[in-house]
Amino acid sequence: EAAAAGGRSDPKPRAMRSRWARGSFLKDGDALMEEALRVSYPGFAREPLQGKGLHEEMRDALHALLQEGYFHYDCVQYGARVNVTRVQRVLVGEPGITYLYQKLRLFALPWDDASVARGALVSIAKLNEQVKRQARKMLAQKGAEGGHVAASAGVGSCDFNLTLINAALTNKHAPPEEGVAGNRKTKKLKGATAADEESENRGPPRQPVLPFKPDTKFDAPIDLAVNWHRDSTLEPFSTIGVYHHTPDSSARDWEIAMCCDAGDLAPPLRTKLSDGECYFMLGNFNHHHQHAVIAGTSARYASTHRVALTQDATFDGIMERCAEVLCGKRFTRSASPESLEAARARAVGELAARLEFDWIRQFYCQGAVHAAQHSTWWAPRIDQLTEKWTELDTELRTMAEVASQQQVPLKALRMLIYLFESRLKGREEWEARLRDPTYKRIPAAYRPIRRPDCSTEGAFTAGMDGLLAALQARLAVRTNSKAAKVAKDTNVTKAAKATKATDITNSAKAAKGAKVAHATTAAKASRVGKAMKARANRS
């Protein structure tokens, strides 16, 4: 067993005892399938969705979301490249929650909002409660088995706070080419252009259906709607519950595939899914396994219920942090330059960068349709975050202007330079992201909106590169001045040491000379005495 965070044990999957063919999947009906699930995949479980009439209600809710254009392809980022997902998605969850994956923050439609898509979100909230009940039952069953199964699959939370719903479509099931009629009441976006409003009035345009990609992990002759992965930014050991729906209820060619991280323990598995079925990845399954979705021939919806981490991921949380920083002692032009603290500069600068890169830009980079569909809940709150960002950057600019002209503590000056360099680097990375050619291949209504625009005249952070240059010049002058003083002090010290050494040398030489002279005089006196004594003896 490997030690896990929080002291909870995290036992790794066990190896199958039976011999199995390398490089191939186990499938439904294979002789070793039951052993593999029991020994190496104990956290995987499945059963039909319970609840009278809920499956039918979900079918209508998902169809309403599709017809009103709420499913979008996500433009995610791997390294420096932007890629489009093969399935369309919408995030639904607790009001104010977000979900970050592959450098893209998704903003949840609140599942208590009955005004969206003929009450579809309320139906999804009911689904979430039912999947939660079934997950609790699964966890209890696994826990009752004891031993390795209980330690692996009978632990963790299933208090789902959001669901990421995937729609894998065919041209047959996609919305009509002309898009959806503009039948939603939405508030006008602050700063919306005429083109944005026209797009909203027409309704979202149809997004071309994208082909699935072949499997490259095992080189199997299959296409994957969702590539191999483990779900990210989740509470450790938490359950993932997935509701599966195909509009063609007779279609059973969609499959879930899974593999162990340690490939020598067991073969990869693939198992077919039935319409209205739920499957669960319990306990530490997501820690030691990856999974993928093998594409079928029909359309498919999957509602993936998760216990997402909420630290740094909710509107209330980021607003609370803004209140903490902005309630602190602000630096103003009337303040003494010596009172500028590096800690204050860091708190202001890092929070401003976080608002800009992790919230404001993330919201608008998903396009005009996304912004319009979130105009009721999220858009006014993004405006609030933009106001906080402006307050923070106003203070940061004041600090920089004072520091570039007056004597502030050296530590604070260095901190401001670091903050400005980091922000400019972040903006360069975002500009490179927005220039990615991938965006040219998607409909204009789904391309990024450049907001906040930091380049326009009068913007609080316009000319940041000029302020950085002034700060760097100020540091160079102070550093050079300090270096000159140090050099001068060093030279004085060296001169004093040299003079002292010379004096010591001269004194030594004088003492030595006196000693030699004394010795010479004594020797001469001795010779004279001897000569006089010799004359006396002769006489």
Image (cartoon, helix red, strand yellow):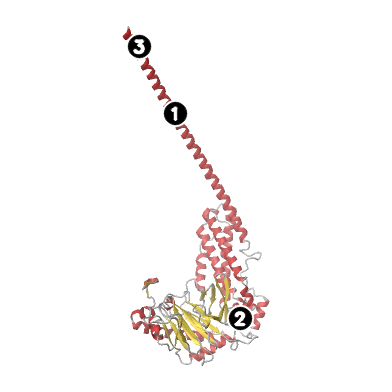
Residue under label 2 = 186
Callout 2: SS = loop
Q: Is residue 406 visible?
A: no
- Residue on which the image places disc 1: 509
Q: Callout 3: few (<14), some (14-19), or many (20+) C-alpha neighbours within 10 Å?
A: few
Measured Cα–Cα span from mark 3 to mark 1:
35 Å
Amino acid at circle 3: Met
Q: Does dot 3 land on a helix, a strand or a loop?
A: helix
Proximity of marks 1 and 2: CB atoms separated by less than 8 Å: no
Quick check: marks 3 and 1 in contact, CB under 8 Å? no
Residue 534 x/y as whole percent = 33, 11
Mark 2 or mark 3, whichever is nearer to me: 3
Q: Who is closer to the viewer here, 402 or 447? A: 447
Label 1, label 2: how far apart the Cα atoms are: 100 Å
The kind of residue tagged 1 is Lys
**Quadrant where the image shows the N terminus:** bottom left
Placement of 198 over or under 247, stated as above or below: above
Residue extending farthest left:
537
Dot in front, 3 or 1: 3
Furthest-right residue in this view? 194
Q: Circle 3 is placed at which residue position?
A: 532
Give the image location of residue 346, x and y in percent: 52, 61
Q: Residue 509 or 450: which is nearer the viewer?
A: 509
Residue 424 at x, y percent in the picture:
59, 63
